[in-house]
Image (spheres, grey):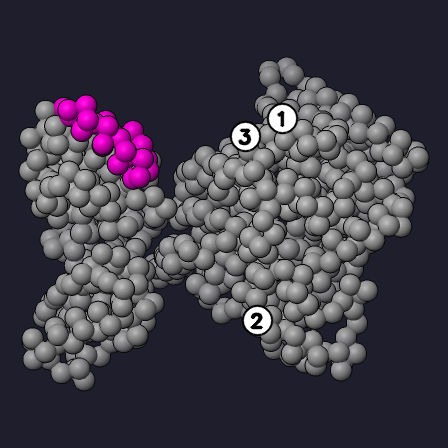
Amino acid sequence: MICAGIDAGSRAIKVVLIEAGSGRVLAKAVTDQGVEQNKLALQLYEKLLNDNDINKKDVGKIVATGYGRNLVTIADTTVTEITCHAVGVRRLVPEVKTVVDIGGQDSKLVRLDGSGRVRDFAMNDRCAAGTGRFLEVVSQRLNVDLTDLGDMAGESKEPALISSMCVVFAETEIVGLLAAGKPKEDIIAGVQSAIAGRIASMAAGNVDKPAVFTGGVAMVSGMRSALESALGCAVSVSPEPQFTGALGAAILACDGAD
Amino acid sequence: MNYEPKQITLQEWDRRYEQLQQEQLCEGDYGGPLGRHVGDGDHRLLELKYDNSPAALKLWNFLLTEEQRLFKAQAEGKKIVGTMKDLGTVPVMVYSLENTVAFYPDGAWWIPCVMQHSAGLLKIADSLGIDESFCPVRAMLGAFVTGKHFPVPDQLICSVGATCDDFSAIAQRLEGLGHEVLWWEMPHRRRCEVDEAGVKLPGGFEAPKSQVEFVKSELERIKTVLEQLSSQALDDETLSAGIKKANVVRRCLAELRQITFTAEVCPLPALEMLIAEMLAIHYCSDQDETIVVLNELIDEVKARVEARKGILAADAARIFWVNPVADLQVMNLLEECGGRICGTEYLFSHAIDLIPEDIPPLEALARMAIADPMAGSSVDRAQRICSDIEKFGCEAVLISRIPGASHCALEGQIIGEIVRGELKLPVIEIEVPPVSDSIRPALRTRLQALVETVKQRRDK
């Protein structure tokens, strides 16, 4: 039997298909999120099935997660992204104790117990300052591609200090820094440091090791080292960080289908 | 029991009301179908889910008719006392007297939620320079300006000092509008110095005797003003009788909490429990009827527990809730996500503790007043929360922040750290504005994740 996990995130939809018995990942896909969230999720799911010659009838159970999980009508059930990221990362990095997930519009810090179950979590979702949205705003304002942010931050000689915890005000600060002749590289490094600082604030000095970084923002180079500086410990990036939520959902679908 | 307990919508309640009327429903003079309150502008009621018992109907009608009750009392010549930033002290003094009624103007903080901003109270507060950086209790200013939600009181009494600096600013603005206020000071409750005489307080804390004496002297001032207002003597005998009656309410609430929070299956929803607990502060302007309302709720939950019936699944996650919410709908949301409330600390735990009856009454009230969780350190409050969590067997803690409210902006982190450290329980914080519709998905994720975490921990 095949099980599916659909992560309907704020910026992207991810689908993972796994074989129930072996837990082997059969296929995965991602597309941009949009207004018609259910339609987009359905289209992506069906395309993934078609591309891999899988019949709908062979899919035993579907779990949806992510911000738009309750809109995914084909899902048998929903589970929050906190639980799904924990399960997904645990599959890929079994020794993980802390999961840092930075997505498009929220960020989470999930602590796991020795059995891999969620022990506690903290979440930032009222302010974009600790999320991927902050990076998007900055890349647009500086006219820099998201994929180049990390390399540019690496060239920073003196990261700028972004003092505001509000993205709108921070954007105003960036305008001011540009006007003052601050190099883009320093501004980007400052923004990455500010995002990491928000995560450190959520952690409140309580990060069990090893810590694993996941979510779409984990793919932005430079963020991992910014996190390491802010948290004061080594942080590894999860394999395929964008898919850990969908993977966790698919694993939970298998557990529920057993 | 001849019906299944469940949560129903307002429309369903109105249909049930017709049916109950045919079965000779016994109501007070404030009774009637719940739906009529929507006509008064309480649009949020359409979005809530309610317990379907006649006792809950009575509770809601009692709450939602307070405005009429106050205007009627004033028309009958009773003296109206607005007791501000006072969660349960001065009302005990006021209700010891004949023909005086205390109410809680701060309660206007729920009007923007219940009326879904249609009353425009926050806009009025904005126009008076009290913007959204302040606690939503700023709605009270708007209520005083419009004069629609409660009568202008004959006397306003407000505590200041350790209780809430936001509220002090708002109340000072109110006085600036021409509403004279009798201020009384609440000191920050501190630990006794070495060799300093201390006094045990209700709730288990201790305060220096000098601080209790100071609060007592402040209450003496209030006593004099109330005596002048009512033309009655508030002597020890009168006040002791008033304390005994206040303790009747407190015993009712303690019993209701004990039964509801420890029942195997949740017998009463979080929303109705929140409203019931709020009655401790000022009795919804009618102390006698508060006792009637609470006793009916107690009878209802006892019957449900005996019949092993409840309104939620037996495996609902047992949550301890800290601080009241600005949007009542969030209480429903917790239950939709699979949680139930099994313990609360809504910032007025001292108003539920019994007032000592074996010491001089003003001393007893002073001890109770300084036991206010807002007057002491957050560590004290956290320790009381830990104690109640253990007492009620809670599995997780939810701390609700009130936007702009300075008395709880940082407290959540301290409480969270202590609960995690001492009890190893998961703790989350949420911030709930008066109308939370736009952040509902984010709130749902947090609540649902908390419930998932509790259930994973059970599987250990």
Residue in the foreground of this view, choosing between A76 and B27: B27
Mark 1 vs mark 3: which is more N-terminal? 1
* Location of the C terminus of chain B (image quadrant): bottom left
Q: Position of residue A210 (x, y in %)?
A: 19, 43
Neighbour tally class for label 1: few under 14, some 14-19, many 20 plus, Cα within 10 Å? some
Give the residues drawn in magenta, as a range.
Answer: A158-182
Could you give the CA–CA distance between mark 1 and mark 2, rounded to whole angstroms?
42 Å
Residue A166 lies in the magenta-colored region:
yes
Q: Residue at x 74, y 54 (%)?
A: B66
Left or right: B55, with B374 as reference point: right
Identify the element where label 2 is drawn.
Answer: loop
> Can residue B5 be seen by looking at this rendering?
no
Residue in the foreground of this view, choosing between B322 and B97: B97
Residue A29, by quadrant, is bottom left
Residue identified by numbered label 1: B161
Compared with residue B262, is residue B180 higher up or lower down, i.e. above or below? Answer: above
The chain under label 3 reads B
Residue B377 is marked as 3
Residue B332 lies in the magenta-colored region:
no
* Location of the N terminus of chain B (image quadrant): bottom right
- Nearer mark to the viewer, of 2 and 3: 2
Residue identified by numbered label 2: B9
Q: Residue at x 16, y 63 (%)?
A: A31
Q: Position of residue B157 (x, y in %)?
A: 74, 33
Q: Amino acid at mark 1?
A: Gly
